[in-house]
Amino acid sequence: MFLTCCPNVYSMMLQTQINFIDNEILLTLDLQPPYKAILKKDFLHIYKDNEPLFSLPLLYPNLISWQFERGLVGFKINNNIYQTDQALKLKELLNGRLFFSKIQDFYTPLQVLGQGSSAKVLLVKSKHSDQYFAAKCVEKNELMYQEIEINNQLDHQAFVKIKEVFQGDTSYYIIMDLLSGKNLQQLIKNQHVGLTLEQTQKIMHALLSGIEHMHLKSIMHRDIKPENIVLQKNNNLTTLKIVDFGLATYTTLKKFKYPKCGTPGYVAPEIANLTDKDATYSSKCDIFSAGAVFFKLLTGRDVFPGTGFNFVLSLNKKCQIDFSVLTLKKIPQNVIRELVQKMLSKDPKMRPTATECLNHEFFTFNDKPTSAQKKTFFAQTRATTLTVDFSSPEEKPEYKGSFVTNDIVPQKCEMQKTINKFNTTEFEQYN
Ligand SMILES: Nc1ncnc2c1ncn2[C@@H]1O[C@H](COP(=O)(O)OP(=O)(O)O)[C@@H](O)[C@H]1O
Ligand SMILES: [Mg+2]
């Protein structure tokens, strides 16, 4: 196995001010004489005759290409190949720090797990172990770095870990933990009366815990909706994961990239009604979206019912919500209604924080479903195995997709469009 630094990265490395600041050595690699490599926290340093030769900063968009050849690994620079028997160890330590290339040397694509508005997610199997992962295939665009960077900062059970990121000719491939359950949209699709109180409590608690963690790190998701909430296993509602950080951003920025984005039906009204692209808003936008998810779990209905992107968006902008449907449920209505209503306040200041939501009395109610209710529910969600629910993704109406509006964002910045073809160079086996 050989590791090749592509020419542009090499020239970039030479341009990079060589930084040999002494910090903790993570790995020392004996390459063939007279070369040696030392991996530190932020750089891979290469030495020749014990003299610093160059440093490769461990950050995107820097790229390392791994190539397999006679079971060896090394760097290939200017036709020189530097070999090491610690290739896999080195790769392990570099995972998620910079781009790799040649995904086809590492993974076999098996099938489509899901499709969103900007990407396809594939089930892939490692070629070097029996492990399965999910690979999110995204068309190349600059927002990618932020999606990875933000995801990497989250350390909580409600988020998947990114393992590696590969770069192909036209796509990036984010290799991440595999979730074998349904997304909430698929889960509640046939639940016309909503879920039970206990199921709703579990889902909302797990969702709000993840949102609380994000917000404490000054990160907002901006596209919380049922399709972006995926169960790790179908029979466990508490192990849900919030996915898709394609529109996530830091709340502390003075100006947001793509300020007007989200999904009609879930987007907070202050974003849907935004007219000044320099205006900012707070992480309370995620509370509104979580409120819309909450409403749907309880009632089986959309907060802003209707069809068509513009129609749903217009209701969303006005934000006149019919809470009377909540009274159909045999549940502690006043308590639930209070929380849902607060979360769906048009005025973000009136919305509770995620922590306040979690401390709400709604989560203390104990209304366990009967075993018959549970049986029916889990029969609908199907048993869980490794290959559970790897059926084709559902056809989704156009308006369900996330948007980045072009009314205040220049057209060229638009990135949320459906990708219909794959970069077959990387995944030639995928049809
Ligand atoms: N780690 C994963 N394991 C299994 N399925 C996933 C995983 N991540 C996402 N999905 C599925 O793929 C769909 C699309 O992924 P997402 O990241 O939301 O893409 P997009 O940015 O295009 O919306 C999700 O709705 C979900 O059903
Ligand atoms: Mg999505």
Image (cartoon, rainbow, N blue to C red):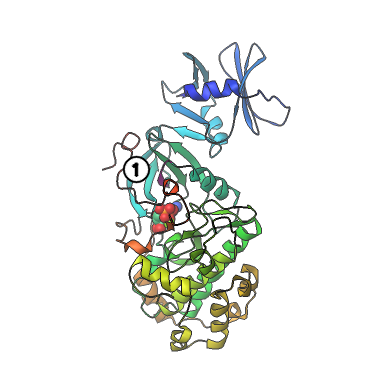
Q: Nearer the viewer, residue 233 or 54?
A: 54
The stretch in magenta equals 135-140
Q: Nearer the viewer, residue 144 or 371?
A: 144
Badge 1 density bin: few <14, some 14–19, many ≥20, Cα 10 Å: many
Q: Is residue 285 at least partly visible in the picture?
A: yes
Q: Residue at image x 53%, y 31%?
A: 62
Q: Is residue 179 at least partly visible in the picture?
A: no
Q: Is residue 288 above or below residue 214?
A: below
| Quarter of the picture holding the C terminus | top left
Q: Specify the principal SS of the magenta part.
A: strand
Q: Whereabouts is ligand 1, in terms of quadrant?
A: bottom left
Percent of width and height locating residue 311: 37, 70
Residue 69 lies in quadrant:
top left
Percent of width and height locating residue 190: 33, 73
Label 1: which residue? 109
Q: Residue at image x 46%, y 67%?
A: 266
What type is the residue that disc 1 sits on? Pro
What residue occupies the far left of the structure in this picture? 431
Q: Is residue 7 magenta?
A: no
Ligand 1 is within 8 Å of the C-beta of the residue at disc 1? no
In the image, 334: left or right of 178? right
Q: Nearer the viewer, residue 148 or 324?
A: 324
Percent of width and height locating residue 126: 41, 40
Percent of width and height locating residue 331: 50, 86
